[in-house]
Amino acid sequence: MLSGILKKEDCASCRFCCSFRRTSLWETPIFTEENITAIEADNRLNSEVLNIVEKDGFKFASYDLGNDYKTQDSFEEVPCPYLGENGCTLSSEEKPWDCKIWPLRVMKKDQEPVIALTPTCPTINSLSIETVRQYVNDDLRNDILDYAKDHPYLIKKYRQDYPVI
């Protein structure tokens, strides 16, 4: 989704967004019902890692990495269960929206959804915030906010360290 400002090669070599520290477990992606259905139909993938929830008329899932940590080090990282040797093993239909828009996040600030920028992406941080803001405003804002409106469970709680775009 951000291919206009991020190079696929940079993302593939970094993979920072595909692993999680204990302190960033809130960032693990949420899978929509459509993602779940596609994953369950793909015999290459293990759908048993998904914790499926039904709430407020929505069916969605996430995965729990808590048992995958081997130490008590809060900086230890555990990869996404769908991260393979050559990158993400998920197809476009299987890939969660959180992953498609990363390093952007839709967050609720003052009861309104806003698009915020993850401050930890090394590649996006090499760009000016104005460049990112312009790209989002020109190409993505409406699509992102419309999708979030239709899938409100994907909206994260606002965090002060995430600049609003």
Image (tube, rainbow, N blue to C red):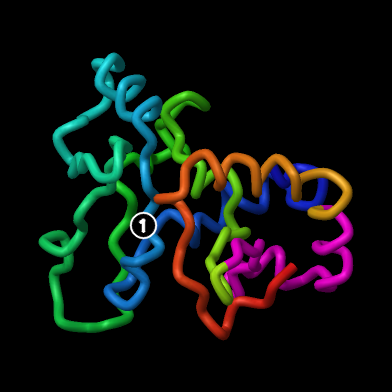
Residue 23 horizontal/vertical position (percent): 32, 78
Which residue is found at the position 30% from the left and 17% from the top?
42
Which residue is found at the position 62% from the left and 59% from the top?
104
Residue 68 horizontal/vertical position (percent): 16, 60
Say whether residue 128 is magenta.
Answer: yes
Residue 50 can be seen in this image: no
Quadrant in the picture for the C terminus: bottom right
Q: What is the quadrant of residue 52 in the picture?
A: top left
Q: What is the quadrant of residue 70 in the picture?
A: bottom left
Q: Residues within 10 Å of mark 1 (few under 14, many from 20)?
A: many
Which residue is found at the position 32% from the left and 55% from the top?
79
The amino acid at mark 1 is Thr
Q: Secondary structure at mark 1?
A: loop
Which residue is found at the position 47% from the left and 24% from the top?
93
Q: Would you name the residue on which mark 1 appears? A: 28
Compared to 42, does 152 lie above or below?
below
Say whether residue 157 is magenta.
Answer: no
Is 153 in front, or is 25?
153
Q: Which residues are magenta?
A: 112-135
Residue 146 horizontal/vertical position (percent): 64, 42
Q: What is the quadrant of residue 78 in the picture?
A: bottom left
**In the visual, does 38 lie left or right of 4?**
left
Residue 96 horizontal/vertical position (percent): 45, 40
Is 142 in front, or is 103?
142
**In the visual, does 2 lie left or right of 57?**
right
**In the visual, does 156 lie left or right of 11?**
left
